[in-house]
Amino acid sequence: MSLFQKRRHVTGNSLPRPPVVPPYLWVPVVGITGLGLYTYYAFLDEVPLTKRKRWIATTPQFEEQIGDQQYQQLLQQYKGKILPESHRASVTVRRVGGRIAKASEKFVADEKLEFASKSPYSYTVVRSDEANAFVLPNNHVFVLTGLFNYVKDEDELAAVLGHEVAHNLARHVGERLSGGVLVQIIGGFLLLLDPSGVLTYFFLPVVNILRELPHSREHESEADRIGIHLAATACHDPRAAKRVFEAMGKGISGAPPEFLSTHPSHSTRIVQFDEWLPSAIQEYEGEFGNRCSSVRSDMQAARRLAAEDVSQRERRK
């Protein structure tokens, strides 16, 4: 008699039946899991150009409303510091920004971005020692004049403005808002499991280092990549982006370690530009260098006219 047969002989012909999980336990679990998977795939989206998959649950219309509200708030916050539209810096930002805006329209068509904002771009230049520029949803761009310590020509300014416009084209604000909601849901669930808040206390800094900060750095890299593409399409030399960050790397000190920063380090960005620039330069130098020749001539003429206009206004004062 085999060992198996002996065991059957001893224990009988029937094995113990596993306990039956009652429906009131497994039905909610299956339902919640199914709903979660459906919600995830229903809101799965793709970043233009980079083709990165990401989860985004906000609508473009909601993002635009937030952008408009923040725009009005910032106009009040910067009241008295906003340069007039006739100021040379404002004129230059609008002129370069207008070319980037046209390039973004081509980008939207090429990438088939159905939900891109159709509102005209606004450019607000603020007198400040801070070297910064940022964008709000619905195409509101702010430039702080401290940036001009590092941006020395229109090609370099185009690199910065292209980067900011790229954030909107990639809907990075919507992605951050969606991720924030997800973190809040998980945090609330942890509070249910542990009302003392110990799990939540450890969860928030961990998710910040392991998810939020890496995502923020990824957004900045995507905006760099799309931004030089926009600059090249607008007939601005995309190589200028490297000059900007090389200058910032030399002039700005005290940055935190990269893994604790919302932005890639300047050295990381320069290495990434070396990877992306060949295709951007090919776009810039298209048609054997003829594609942008007339546009570059128009740029020089526009700069001369702008300088003469500013000079005349100053003499009238």
Image (cartoon, rainbow, N blue to C red):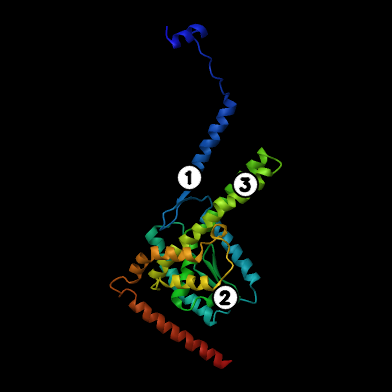
Residue 280's x, y, as percent?
A: 37, 67
Residue 254 drawn at (x, y percent): 59, 67
Check whether the beta carbons of the residues at disc 1 and disc 3 lie within 8 A of each other: no
Say which residue label 1 marks: 42
Q: Quadrant of the N terminus?
A: top left
Residue 41, image x, y percentages: 47, 44
Q: From this view, report whether residue 239 is shown above or below residue 313.
A: above
Q: Quadrant of residue 154?
A: bottom left
Callout in the foreground (3, 2): 3
Alpha-carbon span between mark 1 and mark 2: 43 Å
Q: Would you place residue 291 above or below residue 1 in this image?
A: below
Residue type indicated by callout 1: Ala
Name the amino acid type tagged 3.
Phe
Choose the circle earlier in sequence order: 1 or 3. 1
Which quadrant is home to the C terminus?
A: bottom right
How far apart marks 1 and 3 lie (CA) works out to 27 Å
Residue where numbered disc 3 is placed: 203
- What residue lies at 46% left-to-right and 78% top-to-bottom? 153
Instruction: Compute the Cα span from label 3 to label 2.
Output: 37 Å
Question: Mark 2 highlights which residue?
Answer: 146
- Label 1: which secondary element: helix
Res. 145 visible in picture: no
Whether residue 282 appears in this view of the structure is yes
**Which residue is nearer to you in this view: 185 or 250?**
250
State left or right for residue 21 relative to residue 9.
Answer: right
- Where's residue 135, x and y in %? 54, 66
For label 2, the SS is helix
